[in-house]
Structures are given as C-alpha cells and as structure tokens.
Amino acid sequence: MKNVITIVMTLVLATVCGCQTSSPSGGSVVKGKGFKIAAPTFATEIKQGEVQSVAVSLERGDYFKKDVKLEIEAAKGISVDPTSVIIEASDKPDVQLRISADRNAAIGEYRVSVKGIPKTGESTSTVFNVKVVAP
C-alpha cells in the first residue's frame, strides 16, 4: 500500500509540477557547472494551418556562466522559428519557439530537436513532440 501511495504521489507531482523534461547535462559533468535544456514533456497540439508558441528553457547550474547556442530543428512537415538562438550568460533562460503547421500538413506527431552548444564544454540535446491535428 505504501508503494502504491508513493507511485500515485510521484505521478501527481510530475503532472502538476512539471510539464517539461530536461536533457542530460551539458557544459560540464561537475555538479553546478553544467546546464540542461527543458522542453515540453507532452506533445504540443497544433491545428493544420496554425502557429503555436512553445517555451524552451536553459537550466543553468549555479556556477555555469557561459553563453549557449541553441540549434532547433523540426521534422519535415512543420517549421520552427527561430532555428538558432544564442542565450548569453546574462540573458533570461527562456526562449519562445513558434511552431507552424502548413494547411496541408499530414496529421500525426512530429519531432523537434533542440541542441545546446556552450562556448566551451560538452553540448547536450533534447527532443519534444508536436502533434498536428485537423482544424
């Protein structure tokens, strides 16, 4: 019974507190000196012919003070803007991506990959899904 309660509470907290998933650490493997990329956990739904805004964040360790270039690539059938952005050490860590689906885009799920490349250190990446539905 105790395990069931723990599992249920974990699922509730994951649903309520976090709608984002994080990438593996980049920059450095030393605690506090790296960064992660947070992207939506669940598929972002977009209607054919429409544009949707999606937030992607850079989660910096306490001691990570470097610029990071994000390279964003969408699967064929949808488009993303911007495709590249530099988040400077002094910038806010959030980036709004505009995802658009063509009027005749095939209905289904598409992947969007986000790669974070620091000026020095290891890069990291994450992927999130976009679901195209009928209008």
Image (cartoon, grey):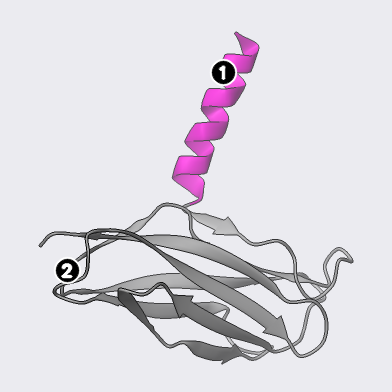
What residue appears at the point 86 percent right and 66 percent down from the top-left corner?
A: 29
- How many discs mark residues in the rendered view? 2
Residue 48 numbered mark, or none? 2
The quarter in which the C terminus is drawn is: bottom left
* Left or right: 134, with 23 as reference point: left
Residue 71 % position (x, y) = 56, 83
Instruction: Say few, some or many: other residues with alpha carbon within 10 Å of mark 1 (under 14 / 14 to 19 / 20 or more).
Output: few
What residue appears at the point 48 percent right and 78 percent down from the top-left corner?
A: 73
What residue appears at the point 70 percent right and 89 percent down from the top-left corner?
A: 67
Q: In this view, does 37 lie above or below 66?
A: above
Mark 1: amino acid: Ile
Mark 2: amino acid: Gln
Write down the quadrant of residue 37 in the picture: bottom right
* Left or right: 98, with 37 as reference point: left
In this view, the mark in front (2 or 1) = 2
Q: Main secondary structure of the magenta part?
A: helix
Residue 83 % position (x, y) = 46, 87
Q: Mark 1 points at which residue?
A: 5
The quarter in which the N terminus is drawn is: top right
* Left or right: 61, with 94 as reference point: right
Q: Does residue 4 show up magenta in the picture?
A: yes
N-terminal of the two: label 2 or label 1?
A: 1
**Mark 1, secondary structure of its residue:** helix
Residue 79 % position (x, y) = 34, 80
Magenta-drawn segment: 1-18
